[in-house]
Image: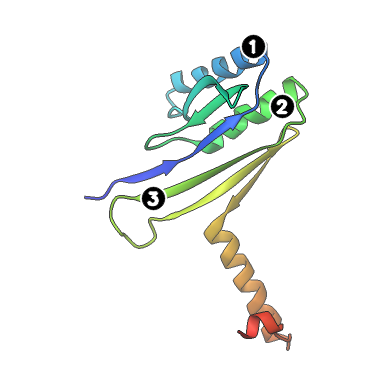
């Protein structure tokens, strides 16, 4: 049997104690809700002398739920701090289709998701359409 993992580790530049307290309380509410798994572990700690909140997972988490809390924090406290959560999808055995990853950008209270494989497939479809209508290949594409 194989084990699947979703892992990430980021330092959020949430430095004011009032904002840190609010953020941790919001994450705790999600952990108590039966509809959500805990989005991640969160610890207030310094990073090279800069205080912040370290969010991370050991085996599994919910970067989408974490992104919702971050977006709400940005709106509530009018933060212009951009946050990017990059995550890895891995498996304990080399199974087909069980590896991947992506990123979530949270900027001014809005969430934008990026999926490595989906974005690559979108680009492939664009390239195939270009070829179908007589598009020319660049020097870089020919090598």
Whole-number angstrom distance, CA of label 3 to CA of label 2: 30 Å
Whole-number angstrom distance, CA of label 1 to CA of label 3: 35 Å
Q: Residues within 10 Å of mark 2 (few under 14, many from 20)?
A: many
- Asked if residue 106 is positioned above or below residue 16 in the image, the reply reads below
41 horizontally vs 94: left or right: right
- Asked if residue 116 is positioned above or below residue 45 in the image, the reply reads below
Q: Residue 89, how many percent across, how many down?
A: 43, 49
Q: Nearer the viewer, residue 137 or 48?
A: 48
Q: Residue 65, how many percent across, how many down?
A: 54, 32
Q: Earlier in the sequence, mark 1 or mark 3?
A: 1
Q: Earlier in the sequence, mark 3 or mark 2?
A: 2
Q: Residue 31, how many percent across, how many down?
A: 45, 22
Q: Residue 22, how many percent across, how many down?
A: 62, 14
Q: Nearer the viewer, residue 139 or 25?
A: 139
The C terminus lies in quadrant? bottom right
Determine the residue positioned at 35% across, 63% down. Answer: 96
Determine the residue positioned at 61% across, 27% down. Answer: 69
Whole-number angstrom distance, CA of label 1 to CA of label 2: 15 Å
Q: Earlier in the sequence, mark 1 or mark 2?
A: 1
Residue tagged by mark 2? 74
Q: Specify the quadrant of the image occupied by residue 123.
A: bottom right
Determine the residue positioned at 62% across, 66% down. Answer: 122
Q: Nearer the viewer, residue 46 or 56?
A: 46
| Residue 51 badge | none
- Regarding mark 1 in the picture, which secondary structure is present there? helix
| Residue 17 badge | 1
Residue tagged by mark 3? 90
Query: Could you tell me if the residues under marks 1 and 3 are in contact, i.e. CB atoms within 8 Å?
Result: no
């Amino acid at each position: 049997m194989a084990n699947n993992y979703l892992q990430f580790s980021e330092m959020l530049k949430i430095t004011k104690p009032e904002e840190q307290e609010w953020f941790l309380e919001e994450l705790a509410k999600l952990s108590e809700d039966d509809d959500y798994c805990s989005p991640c572990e969160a610890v207030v700690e310094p990073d090279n002398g800069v205080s912040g909140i370290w969010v991370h997972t050991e085996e599994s988490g919910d970067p989408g739920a974490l992104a919702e809390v971050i977006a709400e924090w940005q709106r509530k406290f009018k933060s212009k701090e951009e946050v990017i959560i990059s995550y890895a999808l891995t498996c304990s055995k080399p199974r087909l289709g069980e590896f991947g990853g992506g990123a979530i950008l949270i900027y001014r209270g809005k969430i934008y998701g990026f999926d490595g494989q989906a974005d690559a497939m979108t680009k492939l479809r664009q390239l195939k359409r270009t070829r179908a209508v007589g598009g020319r290949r660049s020097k870089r594409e020919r090598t």
